[in-house]
Structures are given as C-alpha cells and as structure tokens.
Amino acid sequence: MNVVVMLGAPGTGKGTQAPLVAKRLRIPVVATGDLFRAAARDGTTLGMEARRYMDAGQLVPDEITVRLLLDRLGRPDATHGVVLDGFPRTSIQAKALDDALAAKGERVDVAVLIDAPEEELVRRMSGRWICRAAGHPYHEVFSPPLVPGTCDLDGSELYQRADDQPETIRARMAQQLDALEDVIGHYRRSGVLRTVDGLQGIHEVAAGITRVLAEAGIHIEDAVAEHDPR
Ligand SMILES: [Zn+2]
C-alpha cells in the first residue's frame, strides 16, 4: 500500500496536483473535507459524531478524523494506497496518523511538498478582482482583464473583496505556513519528505512529483505514455 501525503500552502496548486497523482497511481485521493461529508451522509456512528462538530462550526477532533481516515483506508478502492490532501494539518495529527498506520503495518511512504516563496503565494492568492455589475471574476496574473480595472463583459469597475486583499491573505497565509512548517518538520525528521519547486508550470510540477515519487520507490508506469496537452 502506498500512502502519499501532499503538502503545500494555498496557491501552490496542491489541490490540482493531488487528484492527478492519485489518477496516475490509480489510487483514490482522500481530502478530509470529502471524508467528513461522506461520513455524515453515510450516517455511520463515527460520521454522525463528526457531523455534530461540523454542524456546531467546530473543528472535528483529530481522534475522530484519524478513525475516519483509517476506515477509508480499509475500503476496497484503497487496497493499493491513497493520496492524502489536507491531512495532516499539524504534527500532532501526523503523529496520530503514523501510529494508526503502524498498527496496520503501514507507513507514510512519501510526503510531497510543493514549495513556493510566501510572497509569490500571496501574489497568486491576492490577485482576485470581481466586477461591480455581475461579479465576473478576474485574476491579475492568471486571467487579467483586457483593460486594467474594467470588466471585459460589461465595462463595470473591478474591485477586490476584503478577503482577497493582500493584507488579509498575508495574515491568513502566515498562520497556515506556521502549521505547515510543523508538519514539514515531522516528515523531514522521519525521512520521507520530498520537495518539488512550486514556481514551475503545472506540467513541470507534475513531472517533478513523478520524479520524487520514483525516488521514494513509487513508480508511475504509464507516465511516459501519457498524452501531454502542450
Ligand atoms: Zn462584469
């Protein structure tokens, strides 16, 4: 069983890469949000317990999350492994996951960190602008309007919501990076951390991930045969 943990701050493209990795390894990607939603929907005892916390707007305790995760790992489609996206978020969770996997004779095989400088992430995350008339979305870097500050579709003014402004993003990012550093430290100490440069394009990052997985002994057989859309 291959257990791959995907790590990266918001803006690194982790959420895009995790399903790609999972698809190429032919194993499911397990994101904790989906895990909670599925469990609540299935109505299991554990799921209902998780749901109580979610309904109250509280964080689901680590112990419940890890049990849900183990339950998920026991499903038939996860026989050959999983790609984890969004878990662990803290070194305490990472330790709990290690212990739970060890009890099954398994371990995290590789933790892939998509790394990018904080300022670049702030730039990517804070570039969102929307138009006053209809909320049409733009991004300074990825999908800029033809005329700066003006909607291509209706000519109305573009503005940034408080949530998308650099100061807000920077503050939120600092918190998330602290937690991420904690998890990175955990996997560095256990020797399974591999880093991919997140400043590259999406295809280069994907290729970088394939390379570090191979270094960790996880080979994507069909990687070379895969169609490259460029
Ligand atoms: Zn518009």
Image (cartoon, rainbow, N blue to C red):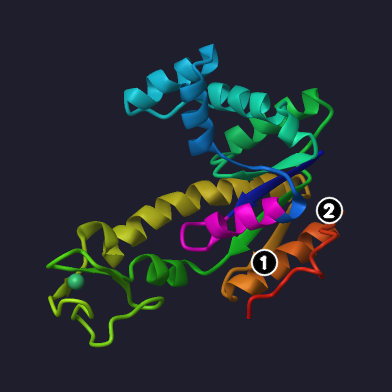
Ligand 1: which quarter?
bottom left
Query: Which residue is drawn at the image coordinates 23% and 80% (left, top)?
Result: 152
**Residue stretch in magenta:** 8-23
Q: According to the image, label 2 marks what residue? A: 218
Percent across and percent down for residue 11 are 47, 63
- Residues at circles 2 and 1 in contact by the CB criterion of under 8 Å: no
Q: Main secondary structure of the magenta part?
A: helix
Q: Residue at the bottom extreme?
A: 147
> Is 55 located above or below residue 151 in the figure?
above
Percent across and percent down for residue 217 are 87, 54
Left or right of 77: which side holds 171? left
> How far is mark 2 from mark 1, CA to CA?
14 Å
The kind of secondary structure element at disc 2 is loop
Query: Which residue is drawn at the image coordinates 69% and 75% (left, top)?
Result: 228
**Magenta stretch: includes residue 95:** no
Percent across and percent down for residue 150 are 18, 81
Q: Nearer the viewer, residue 219 or 104?
A: 219
Q: In the rendered structure, which amino acid carries the disc numbered 2?
A: Ile
The kind of secondary structure element at disc 1 is helix
Q: According to the image, label 1 marks what residue? A: 206
